[in-house]
Amino acid sequence: MGFLMIFTQIEFLLFFLLLLGCLSVIRENRYRKIILLAASYYFYAYWNWRFLGLLFVSTFSDYQIGRYLSKLSTPRQRILLIAASLVINLSILFSFKYCNFFVSSLQHLLIPIGIHVGTLSVILPLGISFYTFRTLSYTIDVYRRRIEPCTSLLDYALFVSFFPTMVAGPIVRASDLLPQFMNSVSLSFRTILLGFRSFVIGCFLKVFVADGIATFTDYVFGNVAVFNSLTIWLAAIGYSMQLYCDFAGYSMMAIGVAKAIGYEIPENFNFPYLSKNIAEFWRRWHITLSKWIRDYVYISLGGSRNGNIRTSINILLTMSLCGLWHGAAWTFVFWGLFHGLALVLYHIWTAVKNHTETKGDVQSSLFCGFFCRTATLLTVVVGWVFFRADGFDRALVLFGKMFYPSAGFGWYHPFVLFVLFSFAIIQFAELSQLGAFHRLQLSAWYTPSVIFTMIWLCIVFHPREFTPFIYSKF
C-alpha cells in the first residue's frame, strides 16, 4: 500500500503545480480533460493502485446504466436497471466498508453459545463512501428524469474520479459538475488567485487550528481517567471545534483547488455552530451529505407525507443510515440515532409551539436566541462524544466523567481556550444582533497581509508528522 497524498503535503503541492502548468499551456478542452482524468487516477493510485479497479467498475457500470435508462420507457425494465445500479454500488460499499463490522458483530453474538467465527481484515478503499454516493446520485437522477444521461465516458469518468473531491467530498452531484466538463473552461489569474485564497484559509483551519487542538483532545481522550470533569468537557468542546476546522478546512481546500483549475464545486459548511436548532444545524453541516440523504433516503422513505409517527420513523431510519455511512461501528449508528431523536423532538416541539404562540414572538427575543444556540451546541457536542469514542464502553466512561463531577487533574490548554473564546465572541456578535459577523466583508480576510500571516503560521506550526483529514477515514 502507498501513502495518501494529503493536501498539506509538499508532494501534493508539486503535483498540483505541475498539473496547473500543463492545463495552462493546453488549449483544447478535450485534451485538458484527458490530462485532468489521468491526474485524478494518479492521485488515487498514489494511495493504492490496486483499488483503481473498483473505481473503473463503478464508473463504467453506472455510465452504461445511465445510457440505457434514457432509452427505455417500460417501467419494469427501468426499475431493473436502477436496481442493478443499487446492487452493484452498495455491494462494493458493503464488501469493503461494512463486511468487517458485521462479521465482528456476528462473532460477538455467537461466542456466548460456543460458536466461533473467523475474523476478516478488509482494507477500506480511499473515498469509497464519497464516490459511491456520487455515482448513485447520477443513476437515480437519470432514473427520475431529473437530468439527461452523460454521453461522454470521458466526462463521466472525470466526474466520478475528480481528485479535489475524492478523499472527503464534497459529494458533488452530476448536475453540478458534468455541465462544467461539457463546456470549455478558461484558466485566468483571477480564478487561480481565488482558489489560492480558499486553499490557504482551509490549510490554516486544518494545520493551525484543528491540528493544534488535536494535541490537547487526543491526549485527554486517551487518558480520561486522570482528568477532572471540566477538562473532559473542554476536550469534548475542543473536539467539536477540531472536527469542524478539520473538515471545513478540507472542503475549502478542495473548493480552492477546483476553482484554481476552472471548476466550481458547492460549499459544504455554513457556520453550523451558530444554528438555533438541530434541523438548522443539519442544513449548515456537511451540506452536500445532508441534501443527499434528504433527497435519496428520507424522501424515498416517504418523508413527512404520512403523518407524525411515520415521519418520526423515517427521520430515525435516515439518521441511522447517515451514522452508518460515517463509519462501520455501532457508535456511529448510535450517533445517528441520537441526532434522529433530537430532530424528532425538535419537530414535536415546533408543532406544539406553533399551536400555542404567535409565530416569531419567541424567536425574535434575545434570550431565546441565546438559549436555542446554546442548547443546540451542547446537543451537538454530546453527540460528538459517540463520534469520537472508540467504542460504547469508552463513550460511557467519557459520559460518566462529564456528567458526574469527579476529582482529577485539570488541564486548561491555552490555545483551546483561545479558540473557544474567539467562538464566544462570534456568538455574542450574532446574539447582540449587531450582525457584525455576517456584515463583515469577507474581502478583509483575503488581504495579502492576512493570507501571508496564515501561510507563515501554517509553516511554523506544521506538525512533524502529517495528520490525515478525519473524514478521509470514511
Image (spheres, rainbow, N blue to C red):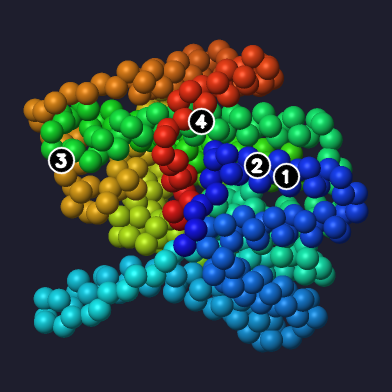
Q: What element carries label 3?
A: helix
225 vs 297: above or below: above
Q: Which residue bears the numbered disc 1?
A: 18
Please state which amino acid type lies under the numbered disc 3.
Answer: Gly
Q: How crowded is mark 1: few (under 14 residues within 10 Å), some or many (20 or more)?
A: few
Please state which amino acid type lies under the numbered disc 4.
Answer: Leu
Q: Position of residue 139 (x, y in %)?
A: 67, 70
Q: Where is residue 197 in the image (x, y as percent from the top left)?
A: 67, 29
As measured in the structure, the alpha-carbon distance from the residue carrying label 2 to the one carrying label 3 is 48 Å
**Residue nearest the observer in this picture, 473 or 463:** 463
- Per the rendering, the mark at residue 205 is 4
Going from N to C along the chain, the mark reached first, 3 or 1, is 1
Labels 2 and 1 touching (C-beta < 8 A): yes
As measured in the structure, the alpha-carbon distance from the residue carrying label 3 to the one carrying label 1 is 52 Å
Q: How crowded is mark 2: few (under 14 residues within 10 Å), some or many (20 or more)?
A: few
**Residue nearest the observer in this picture, 100 or 77:** 100
363 vs 164: above or below: above
Q: Which residue bears the numbered disc 3?
A: 400
As measured in the structure, the alpha-carbon distance from the residue carrying label 4 to the one carrying label 2 is 21 Å
**Residue shown at 26% from the left, 70% from the top:** 105
Labels 4 and 2 touching (C-beta < 8 A): no
Please state which amino acid type lies under the numbered disc 1.
Answer: Leu
